[in-house]
Image: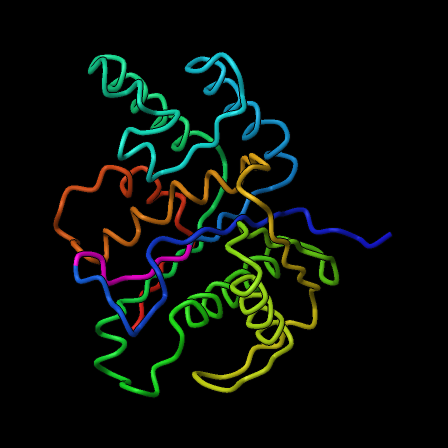
Amino acid sequence: MKEFSDYVVYVDESGDHSLTSIDQQYPVFALSFCVVSKAEYISKVVPALQDFKFKYWGHDCVVLHEHEIRKEKGDFAFLRTNRALRNGFMQDLSDLMASVPFEIIGCVIDKQKHLDKYGQTAWNPYEVALKMALERLLLFLREKCTVGRLSHVIFECRGPKEDAELELAFRRTVAGHKNWGWISRDFSDFEFEPRFVKKGANSTGLQLADLTARPMGLKVLRPTQENRAFDIIAPKLREFKTFP
């Protein structure tokens, strides 16, 4: 058997990475790496989320999704019917996010600025954010873990073509391949393995990542606007990079 890392990483994004059609209402791409100790994930993170779900639904089959919560639809439609209940739900969710132990490596790409600066040579925003996040994950693991161990980075499935492209970019980065950007990093003291998981798997870690990506995007897009969700996760930000 391989020797595994003491940490696991869950990834989600906010916004799309297209540079050919930029939504002027949300012209950013945000990538969130949620890094959590496996021991604390088992003993604290998962039980806390399960308790939350049983309180509001009576079962744990609901998948927390930032977009559906914000729009109050699907499993969250009940939030529209009772303002006091909605306020209690949002406070409990905020308390949950503040209390469970994990760290965030966040990267936000301002797509319009990226395109304006680099034009036709502009690199794929997802690849830029992924490279930046993986490099900082490497530094985190060097500080926290025994070298040589296998670390899993968990992504939500987006479709066969997108997943294949993302896996290729991931493996090129950890192999030290450099075809653009800054200096190449040596990832050889750790082994990295991407995993792609369907939303229906109801992964606790992927739900945490989902809830953290958009607040970072909004912080970059509208830095002076009140952003309670970002304020809650700000103490967990190990790195928060923007580009360009």
**Res 153 → quadrant:** bottom right
Furthest-left residue in view? 224
**Res 170 → quadrant:** bottom right
Side of 51 relative to 191 (left or right): left
Side of 4 relative to 169 (left or right): right
Q: Residue at x 70, y 64 (%)?
A: 191
- Quadrant of image for the C terminus: bottom left
Q: How has the structure been colored for display?
A: rainbow
Magenta includes 27?
yes
Q: Is residue 92 above or below residue 58?
A: below
Q: Residue at x 62, y 77 (%)?
A: 186
Q: Is residue 186 above or below residue 29?
A: below
Furthest-right residue in view? 1
- Residue 59: x and y in percent read 53, 16
Magenta includes 236?
no
Q: Residue at x 27, y 76 (%)?
A: 114
Q: Residue at x 41, y 15 (%)?
A: 56
Q: Is residue 45 above or below residue 151?
A: above
Q: Is residue 130 above or below residue 156?
A: below
The segment highlighted magenta reads 25-31
Side of 24 relative to 93 (left or right): left
